[in-house]
Amino acid sequence: MMHMTLYWGKDVTLLIDSWKTNSWLSYLLTLLACFLFSSFYQYMEDRRLRFRSLASSNPSPPSSAGASVPLLPKYRRSAKFATALLFGINSAIGYLLMLAIMSFNGGIFLAIVLGLAVGYLVFRSADDETVVVENVCACA
């Protein structure tokens, strides 16, 4: 039976049919996995933003006026590809977390929200010093 309202209990089917909790131990391990996975989401977001800022920063000009940097366009292309790949992985993790919350279990909801908060505190709280607006749309 799929719940359509928030409920509390140890019996949860999470994401796939084979991930069912029927004991308190399996439920607590599932809550721990959700907590760690949501903290990992914040870590990946931090890595993606740091890599993006490194990839978009202008390299220092060469010391001699006649020197050229022939690999710069190739570097930019690979950096854009890597940034896009990190964005895709992070988006997939975010959607999986959303689907896990849609199990409507209160414990799962709290574990994911607490994991996101702790992950933000540990990995991304230093981001408050510099504000980078990449898109003003709230949906991006």
Image (cartoon, helix red, strand yellow):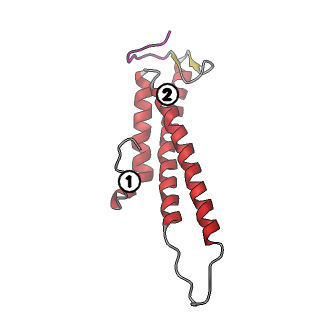
Q: Which residue is mark 2?
A: 99
What kind of residue is marked 1?
Answer: Ser
Q: Looking at the rendering, in which quadrant would you find the C terminus?
A: top left
Given residues 39 and 79, the one toward you in this image is 79
Does 136 sit left or right of 73 as displayed?
A: left
Q: In the rendered view, does 17 fall on the left or right side of 97? A: right
Q: Chief secondary structure of the magenta span? A: loop
In the picture, the disc for residue 125 is 1
Q: Residue 67's x, y, as percent?
A: 62, 86
Is 5 one of the magenta-colored residues? Answer: yes
Task: Give percent across and percent down for residue 30.
Answer: 53, 27
Q: The disc labelled 2 sits on which kind of residue? A: Leu
Residue depicted at 50% across the width and 65% down the height: 56
Asked if 58 appears above or below 18 in the picture, the reply is below
Indicate whether 78 appears above or below 89. below
Residue span colored magenta: 1-10
Query: Label 1 neighbourhood size at 10 Å, few (<14), some (14-19), many (20+)?
Result: few
Query: Which structural element holds mark 1?
Result: helix
Q: Residue at x 65, y 72 (%)?
A: 71
